[in-house]
Image (cartoon, rainbow, N blue to C red):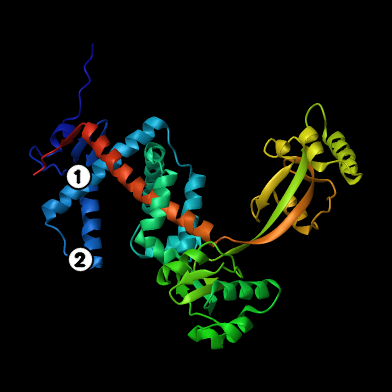
Amino acid sequence: MKKILLPLIILTSIPLFAKIEVLDRVAVIVDDGIIMESQIKNNLEEMAAKYDEQNIPKPEIKVLREQVVEQLIIEELQLQLANRAGIRISDAELNGTMTRIAANNKMELQEFMSFVEANDDSFEDVREKVRTEMIIQRVQRSRVGREVDITEKEFKAFLATDESLIELQPELLARQILVKTLENANEAIARIENGEDFAKIAEEISLSANSVNGGIMKWRKASDMPELFANALAKKKISGITSPLKSGSGYHILRLEEKRGNFVQNQEQWSSRHILLIPSAIRDEESSEKELNEIRLRVIGGESFGELADEYSEDPGSAKKSGELGWLGKGVLASQFEKTMIESEVGAVSEVFQTEFGFHFLEVLDKRTQDMTDELIEDRAYQLLYARKYEEALEGTLRSIRDEAFVEIKDLD
């Protein structure tokens, strides 16, 4: 067999003792993955820069490096969990997130890209960092979210004791009438119920110093009021009047005039009921619409809406409730359903109309304007409590993941 001879130049063109330049090295082995020395270096520089930007004294470089390494280990472990669980962030989803980030910075996406590049950053690098953060958040929610449990008792205790909730309270504007006896108080309430003006009655009979101003008191949060007043006004709606409140000064009658604050919101709501027929292979759209029109005529003819809903409606949520949907505001129902509901008079039966769910007709039972302040504050309080418990659970979960992992930190010095 003829041997292949390599040209001598290939062997002799490389200096025998040329210096080998190391571009990067494995710094940490984490289960099935690795962390490169360059990752540690880049993150260390970024963290040091953040300390400098905020004018905060930096820890010793050794301590800072240990922090960075631990962060990268935890991140790598979570990404491995995501990979095993098949968690992916599509380009479309990532693009949507980048667009929202740009909007939050009051920029269009193209403008945001230019801004990033102008600050010596790579938009693609930023984009991939956001993708990584989204993946990690999804892993954390799947591992930790189900561990957070808030009982009703725990939530009520939090509402009653957490000082941070005081900031959420609205300010209240109230009027008062102060009289000597319970008899005087009941007489004043009777006059109010008969239509007399609260402020004029206060000017006439109130013993309080603010009687000359119609009993008006200054804007205050409930927490800044006497407990007697705060408790009485706690669940009152605007224009609501309390029963007589006994104190050392006599008997007080309060009227809630107004609320103000970030969580004060009044919402228009409708109480309605409907009957739904859903087209199918057995009953097509034309037949469904025709049958529903016949049911509607029976309602108009005097038959019970509720009984017909029980018998015919194919909405699983309301059919066995006489078709009733309860009190709902805007933005909850299908757009055509909402439009028909808003335009309908109380007690009138609408024409048959179509939504993506099928064919309906409805009747508005009542309308109201609902004070949503307490509900919004409770929602915000729940978010605060959930966030606190989530952070506690997350810390424990990450510590457990770290403790169970195989980690080998290389000595690269």
Question: Is 179 left, or right, of 150 in this rendering?
Answer: right
Identify the residue at horizontal 48%, vertical 77% (top origin): 219
Work out whether residue 136 or residue 30 is closer to the camera in this orientation and state it: 136
Mark nearer the viewer, 2 or 1: 2
Query: Regarding mark 2 in the picture, which secondary structure is present there?
Result: loop
**Looking at the picture, how far across and down is residue 375, in whole percent?**
53, 56
Residue tagged by mark 2? Answer: 56
Determine crowd level at label 1: few under 14, some 14-19, many 20+ residues with C-alpha closer than 10 A: some
Work out whether residue 220 or residue 182 is closer to the camera in this orientation and state it: 182
Quarter of the figure that contains the N terminus: top left
Question: Is 60 left, or right, of 256 in this rendering?
Answer: left
Residue tagged by mark 1? Answer: 37
Quarter of the figure that contains the C terminus: top left
Identify the residue at horizontal 59%, vertical 65% (top origin): 237
**Looking at the picture, how far across and down is residue 176, in whole percent?**
54, 77
Q: Is residue 7 above or below residue 160?
A: above
Q: What's under tag 2, amino acid-wise?
A: Ile
Instruction: Say whether residue 155 is visible.
Output: yes
**Looking at the picture, how far across and down is residue 231, in whole percent?**
47, 64
Query: Regarding mark 1 in the picture, which secondary structure is present there?
Result: helix
Instruction: Say whether residue 258 is visible.
Output: no
Res. 241 mark:
none
Identify the residue at horizontal 20%, vertical 23% (top origin): 5
**Mark 2 or 1, nearer chain start:** 1
Determine crowd level at label 2: few under 14, some 14-19, many 20+ residues with C-alpha closer than 10 A: few
Report the residue that reaches farthest toward the top: 1
The part of the image, by quadrant, that contains residue 397 is top left
